[in-house]
């Protein structure tokens, strides 16, 4: 085997152009395969980082031109009222906030969610508490839960951050919790999460079409 290896090395040394092309081709092929596997592993093979994640299912509305249309708050209220099958249904929508009132204003990525989203995911704050049903309604105190990474970078991991206030998009929010390390939803860079403040109830017989009025939201359930 050693003699074969030495022979191969001598042949490669005699043809530097061929050697360069061969090495480059192998490098590109290995890199491409690694990249494709990384994507497939992250999207298809690796389970979601939540307990019993195989039970979590995305929910979509329907309309003539879209088989999987975004949902509306009206859809969510109707589904929640008529649900007799799923454990619970929760919604979220990504949102950017302007963090001000500090020596370093910045734009932070976050989300507005239905108050029971973390219960659906079965992930609870590592510090502080989850949202209450009362905080998920209009007129309630504005509250926010921080990601662990944002808590570390912005507040230095201060355990006394609970009940402190912060200004997001000119509104004052009270910090009530900090999520576990590595948790970020729905965006890997999500730093803050607050309730969507749902109101009203679904009308019996109302349409479940995604054309219902209101902003579009994403929805999920646990089977």
Image: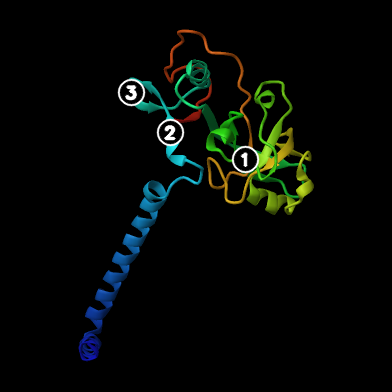
Reply above or below: 20 against 203.
below
Q: Position of residue 82 (x, y in %)?
A: 48, 15
- Say which element carries label 3: loop
Looking at the image, the residue that sits furthest to the top is: 204
Residue 132 visible in the picture: yes
Kindly report which numbered mark, 3 or 1, lies closer to the viewer in this rendering.
1
In the picture, the quarter occupied by the N terminus is bottom left
Report the disc number at residue 124.
Answer: 1
Q: First in sequence, mark 2 or 3: give its number.
A: 2
**How many C-alpha atoms fall within 10 Å of the one at disc 2: few (<14), some, or many (≥20)?**
few
Front residue of 144/48: it is: 48
The location of residue 207, given as percent across then percent down, is: 43, 12
Which residue was labeled with disc 3?
A: 65
* Residue occupying the point 35% across, 56% down: 37
Circle 3/circle 1 CB separation < 8 Å: no
Residue 147 screen position, x and y as percent: 63, 45
The disc, 3 or 1, on the residue closer to the chain's N-terminal end is 3
CA neighbours of label 1 inside 10 A, class few (<14), some (14 to 19), many (20+): some
Which color mode does the image show?
A: rainbow
């Amino acid at each position: 085997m050693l003699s074969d290896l030495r022979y191969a090395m001598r042949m490669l040394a005699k043809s530097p152009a061929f050697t360069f092309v061969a090495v480059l081709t192998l490098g590109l092929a290995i890199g491409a395969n690694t990249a494709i596997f990384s994507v497939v592993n992250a999207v298809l093979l690796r389970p979601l980082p939540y307990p019993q994640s195989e039970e979590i299912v995305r929910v979509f509305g329907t309309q003539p031109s879209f088989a999987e249309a975004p949902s509306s708050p009206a859809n969510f209220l109707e589904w929640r009222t008529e649900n007799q099958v799923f454990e619970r249904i929760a919604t979220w929508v990504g949102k950017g906030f302007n963090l001000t009132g500090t020596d370093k204003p910045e734009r932070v990525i976050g989300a507005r969610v239905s108050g029971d989203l973390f219960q659906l995911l079965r992930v609870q704050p590592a510090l502080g508490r989850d949202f209450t049903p009362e905080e998920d309604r209009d007129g309630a105190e504005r509250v926010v839960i921080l990601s662990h990474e944002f808590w570390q970078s912005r507040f230095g991991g201060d355990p006394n951050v609970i009940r402190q206030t912060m200004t997001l998009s000119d509104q004052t929010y009270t910090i009530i919790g900090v999520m576990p390390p590595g948790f970020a939803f729905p965006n890997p860079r999500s730093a803050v999460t607050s309730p969507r403040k749902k109101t009203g109830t679904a009308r019996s017989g109302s349409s479940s079409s995604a054309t219902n009025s209101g902003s579009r939201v994403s929805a999920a359930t646990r089977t």
